[in-house]
Image (cartoon, rainbow, N blue to C red):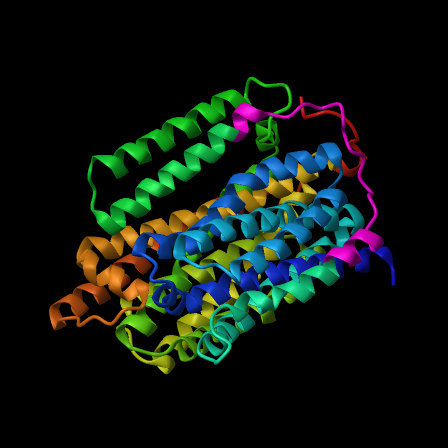
């Protein structure tokens, strides 16, 4: 097997594991919360904590990979992810599960921060879209199986703890495989210093802002959540200032002077904000309104992932031949159409929801691979590690913001006690008026997300193929 396919296979396993675990927890969350007697806030952070630590650490790990080597940190990521899975499977309480999920998320961040850079290093520009597309498809395939397996395992005699067991043998094998088969093809820049102040400001800013957003949505907009959100904005603002002053920043803002890079990153963030909360909102609808069990609710969401898997490799292959701008732009426009459909057409059963689900999945498949390929192709070789981390950070940040927006919109029209009870998996009686308000809030949310997706078409259309062959650049940040 050629080495580039060894890298593709191993990183594909990593993408599959990370997304599989996230969706398994999503669909099984009501069962987990009920068994551990977790509070609504703990229930939220079983999901949010994993994503938050990913978003907070991706930049740091991407920067470290440029300095110490991508393969070494990627291998550590597999090992940490596997250990975190084992700890999560024996969690005795909601709080302990949140903490163990943070360990698991740290391993996932090490995997995500390096996967795209490893693929970009070994695949030529004419094959990168296809390779990155296959990697993304593997992650989406994990989401398909995660939705189904989460419902099956959580409702079986094995219990919800078994959803973490499946990561342990796969993770152990992949860790050893990566250790013995992957080799460093980049040139680590060991003389460059780290950016501890930037790391602290970014992580603190993102964490406090999201903490305030989620606390306000669930418990009311008092001084504490508003103050936390304000502190988060101040930290992020200070982070941007610091990154322009330090010699070796964790986020290389000079990369944004490359038009294709800046456009791809902006579209990445907006598209992730648009589609991030869709699955969670639909889980609310299927389990809280239609009263479906976890397994059946998971099956209802599979068409989205199947459409994504079908279009992802094809879009990546075609973007290698004809350029990424047209495919990425078409993808977000298709997503916008699906979101507007959700927002304007009355909700119903599976067959009424099927067309927009298929459109949303197809649009996501068309967008992701060309977008990632355009970003990585525009990045100088020595900066691909940090660029990969920046790209994944914006995806996770957009996803977190989308979840926060979703909770805020729903909480504005539904009593917090009803929303908390639905999310925690406890039985609750909803009056016809409350049900109508809940459905109206979902329609309004989808319309808002549709406009965000539509706006993301602007940077995708503005992106141009870089004229410089950055593979020849081997030293220093951009001047």
| Relative side of 290 to 306, left or right | left
Q: In the rendered view of the protein, which quadrant contains the N terminus?
A: bottom right
Q: Residue at x 75, y 23 (%)?
A: 191
Q: Could you tell me residue 170's position as x and y percent?
A: 68, 65
The answer, for residue 130, to whether it is visible in the render is: no
Q: Could you tell me residue 174's position as x and y percent?
A: 73, 60
Magenta span covers which residues?
A: 175-199
108 or 321, which lies in front?
A: 108
| Relative side of 468 to 152, left or right | right
Q: Report the label total.
A: 0
Q: Could you tell me residue 332's position as x and y percent?
A: 48, 56
Q: In the rendered view of the protein, which quadrant contains the C terminus?
A: top right
Q: Could you tell me residue 239's position as x and y percent?
A: 48, 26
Confirm whether the magenta stretch covers residue 110.
no
135 or 326, which lies in front?
A: 135
Confirm whether the magenta stretch covers residue 184.
yes
Q: Look at the picture and state if 158 lies above or below 134.
A: below
250 or 265, which lies in front?
A: 250
Q: Residue at x 25, y 64 (%)?
A: 421
Residue 60's image quarter?
top right
The answer, for residue 475, to whether it is visible in the render is: yes
Q: Residue at x 20, y 56 (%)?
A: 416
> Which residue is outermost to the right?
1
Q: Residue at x 39, y 47 (%)?
A: 401
């Amino acid at each position: 097997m050629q080495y580039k396919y060894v890298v593709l296979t191993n990183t594909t396993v990593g993408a599959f594991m990370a997304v599989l675990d996230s969706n398994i927890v999503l669909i099984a969350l009501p069962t987990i919360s009920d068994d551990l007697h977790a509070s609504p806030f703990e229930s939220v952070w079983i999901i949010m904590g994993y994503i938050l630590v990913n978003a907070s650490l991706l930049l740091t790990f991407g920067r470290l990979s440029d300095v110490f080597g991508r393969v070494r940190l990627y291998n550590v990521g597999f090992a940490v992810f596997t250990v975190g899975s084992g700890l999560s499977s024996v969690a005795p309480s909601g709080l302990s599960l949140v903490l163990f999920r943070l360990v698991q998320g740290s391993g996932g961040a090490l995997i995500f921060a390096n996967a795209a850079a490893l693929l970009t290093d070994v695949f030529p520009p004419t094959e990168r879209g296809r390779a990155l597309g296959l990697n993304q498809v593997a992650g989406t395939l994990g989401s398909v199986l995660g939705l189904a397996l989460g419902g099956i395992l959580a409702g079986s005699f094995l219990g919800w703890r078994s959803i973490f067991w499946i990561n342990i043998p796969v993770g152990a094998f992949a860790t050893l495989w990566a250790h013995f088969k992957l080799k460093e093809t980049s040139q680590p820049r060991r003389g460059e210093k780290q950016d501890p102040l930037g790391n602290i400001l970014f992580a603190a800013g993102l964490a406090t802002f999201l903490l305030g957003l989620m606390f306000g949505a669930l418990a009311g907009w008092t001084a504490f959540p508003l103050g936390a959100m304000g502190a988060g904005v101040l930290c992020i603002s200070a982070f941007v200032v610091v990154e322009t002053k330090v010699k070796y920043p964790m986020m290389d803002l000079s990369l944004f002077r490359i038009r294709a890079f800046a456009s791809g990153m902006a579209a990445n963030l907006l598209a992730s904000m648009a589609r991030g909360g869709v699955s969670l909102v639909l889980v609310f609808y299927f389990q809280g309104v239609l009263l479906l069990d976890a397994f059946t609710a998971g099956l209802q969401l599979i068409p989205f992932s199947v459409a994504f898997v079908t279009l992802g490799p094809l879009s990546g292959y075609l973007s290698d031949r004809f350029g990424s701008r047209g495919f990425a732009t078409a993808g977000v426009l298709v997503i916008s159409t699906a979101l507007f459909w959700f927002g304007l057409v009355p909700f119903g059963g599976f067959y009424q929801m099927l067309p927009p689900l298929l459109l949303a999945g197809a649009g996501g498949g068309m967008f992701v691979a060309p977008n990632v390929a355009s970003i990585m192709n525009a990045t100088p070789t020595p900066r691909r590690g940090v660029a990969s981390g920046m790209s994944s950070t914006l995806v996770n940040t957009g996803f977190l913001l989308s979840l926060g927006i979703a909770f805020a919109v729903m909480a504005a029209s539904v009593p917090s006690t009803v929303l908390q009870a639905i999310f925690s998996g406890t039985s609750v009686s909803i009056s016809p008026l409350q049900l109508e308000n809940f459905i109206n809030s979902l329609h309004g949310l989808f319309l808002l997300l549709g406009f965000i997706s539509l706006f993301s078409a602007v940077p995708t259309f503005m992106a141009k193929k870089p004229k410089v062959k950055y593979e020849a650049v081997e030293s220093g940040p951009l001047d």
